[in-house]
């Protein structure tokens, strides 16, 4: 594949969890992938190295998703290295659990800085740079619908992402670029498993009719579909990818 025809994906939060699974899945589809990461340089380089070892193309780039200058540089690296950007998957996110009455507002501000401001910052550059035929995919959570106690700040931040989805689709009118939000249910990542005992994990796994936790690869398959020509007629949607939890 020539430099002019290679498809290029930027994946924020690409060093771990769902983001890593997305990097690996898109690389298998032939994408050159930019692995965006916040602090885990070792993990990001490991992911990029695995793609390279399998014959793919990847670089890792450190960037705070809420810092506009750093995200501009991330996109410019993608353009310098690979010639452009076709898919942006904004998988970076932050989780904080607390009843609203006990919520530390400093923690609330940090969560919204990453989840809300970060989505706006990444979307701003994606809208400016994506090539025709491209896709922007952001992340919410099925907790927005489930309304679980303790998830108030997190669900509120992801509700903002969902509200943005249709507006972004309309702002991209006429450019042949789609934008959708994926809202996973309980998924076996470090972010989800941290701080939960086995009883809690087992109870949450049984919420879905399929009676298991999602795997990062389950979510990555949906992302790969939305990024592909086969998924290009899906636009402005929030997809609950959760095994049937309602």
Image (cartoon, rainbow, N blue to C red):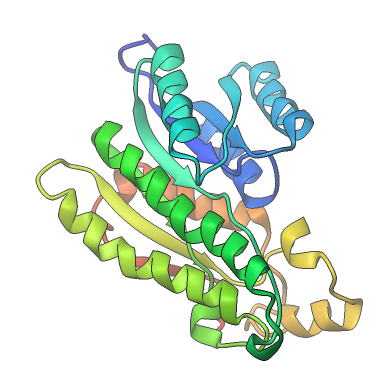
The image position of residue 153, as x and y in percent, is: 58, 76
Which residue is painted at 58% across and 37% down in the image? 23
Percent position (x, y) of residue 10?
47, 34
Residue in view at x 73 percent, y 66 percent: 192
Residue reaching furthest to the front: 106
Position of residue 19 measured from the top left corner of the image (x, y, whole percent): 60, 46
Q: Position of residue 7 (x, y in %)?
A: 38, 25
Q: Residue furthest right?
A: 198
Q: Residue at x 46, y 60 (%)?
A: 116
Residue 116 visible, this orientation = yes
Q: Quadrant of residue 22?
A: top right
Q: Is residue 31 visible?
A: no
- Pick whichever, 160 or 227, lies toward us: 160
As drawn, the residue found furthest toward the top would be 2
**Above-or-below relation of 146 to 161:** below
Above or below, 241 relative to 119: below
Answer with left or right where residue 87 lies relative to residue 155: left
70 shown above or below 206:
above
């Amino acid at each position: 594949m020539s430099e002019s025809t290679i498809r290029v994906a930027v994946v924020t939060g690409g060093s771990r969890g769902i983001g890593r699974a997305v990097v690996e899945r898109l690389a298998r589809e032939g994408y050159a992938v930019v692995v965006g990461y916040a602090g885990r340089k070792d993990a990001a380089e490991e992911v990029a190295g695995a793609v390279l070892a399998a014959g793919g193309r990847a670089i890792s780039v450190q960037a705070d998703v809420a810092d506009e200058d750093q995200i501009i540089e991330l996109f410019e690296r993608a353009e310098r290295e690979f010639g452009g950007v076709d898919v942006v998957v904004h998988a970076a996110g932050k989780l904080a659990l607390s009843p609203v009455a006990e919520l530390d507002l400093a923690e609330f501000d940090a969560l919204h800085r990453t989840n809300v401001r970060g989505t706006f910052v990444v979307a701003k550059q994606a809208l400016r740079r994506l090539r025709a035929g491209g896709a922007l995919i952001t992340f919410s959570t099925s907790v927005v619908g489930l309304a679980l106690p303790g998830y108030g700040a997190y669900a509120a931040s992801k509700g903002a992402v969902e509200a943005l989805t249709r507006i972004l689709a309309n702002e991209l009118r006429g450019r042949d670029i789609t934008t959708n939000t994926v809202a996973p249910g309980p998924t076996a990542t470090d972010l989800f498993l941290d701080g939960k005992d086995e009883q809690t994990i087992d109870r949450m796994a049984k919420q879905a009719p399929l009676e298991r936790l999602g795997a990062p690869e389950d979510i990555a398959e949906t992302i790969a579909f939305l990024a592909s020509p086969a998924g290009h007629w899906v636009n402005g949607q929030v997809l609950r990818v959760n095994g049937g939890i309602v």
